Amino acid sequence: MGNCYALDTTVWSEDAVVGFEASERIFDYFVSDNPDGRFLEYRKPHAIADKGYTKANIIKTDYIRAVPSVPILSTRAIEVFGDRLRDDADIEDCIVRCGDEEFLFHILRINRRIEGLIDKSRTEYRKRRDYEIPWFLVYNPNIQEPFMLAKDAERITYWVASEAFRELALKNKLKISFRALRV
């Protein structure tokens, strides 16, 4: 499989992030896999850009950082990845408001779950009162299942891009930053 990657925006500001209207619904459907996506029949997801994004820089990136952590890609990126991405994720239109303008992007619901994507034995945990949370995730480099985007079958809030995703993005000069994850 190769390396796993976290994606980030190419806009270099800690405030380059968007938040969603109805963020609980967004989390439930796009992250937690709640099958009830009926709200999408009535209105596209809407996100509001924080001050790190401007009208000038938001159109120059192909990946938008969001809270909750869901992949948001440009139309150009969706065209590049095409059907390869549709094997791993559902793609919905998403409106991002930046200042007084709205921009069309695409939010992804990652459906591909891979058992053992996170190597639990090598991941470092932080103890809380009665549970542990992953502190430094370590990904399993021996996954044989091909994918573009995937999330761990057990810890579904953690998702990664594959080496194939990164190579295709770089080949097509997409404006996406990649950070190799620990393996």
Image (cartoon, rainbow, N blue to C red):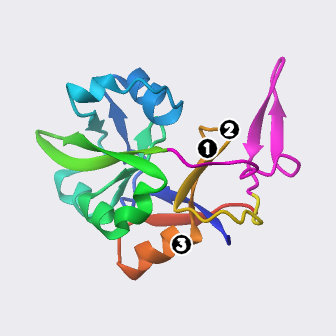
Question: Which mark's residue is nearer the viewer, 3 or 1?
Answer: 3
Question: What is the secondary structure assignment of the residue under circle 3?
Answer: helix
| First to last magenta residue range | 111-139
Extreme residue in the left direction: 100
Q: In which quarter of the image is the N terminus?
A: bottom right
Up the image or down, 156 lies above or below 4; here it is: above
Q: Contact (CB < 8 A) between labels 1 and 2?
A: yes
Q: Residue at x 39, y 23 (%)?
A: 25
Residue 164, label in figure: 3
Amino acid tagged 1: Tyr
Q: Which residue is drawn at 49% across and 53% down?
A: 88
Residue 117 falls left or right of residue 70: right
Residue 120 falls left or right of residue 33: right
Task: Say which of 66 and 87 sits in front.
Answer: 87
Q: Residue at x 43, y 77 (%)?
A: 170
| Residue holding disc 2 | 155
Q: Is the magenta stretch mostly helix, strand or loop?
A: loop
Amino acid tagged 3: Ala
Measured from the top left, where is residue 32 in percent x and y? 54, 30
Extreme residue in the top direction: 129
| Residue holding disc 1 | 158
Amino acid tagged 2: Arg
Question: What is the secondary structure assignment of the residue under circle 1?
Answer: loop
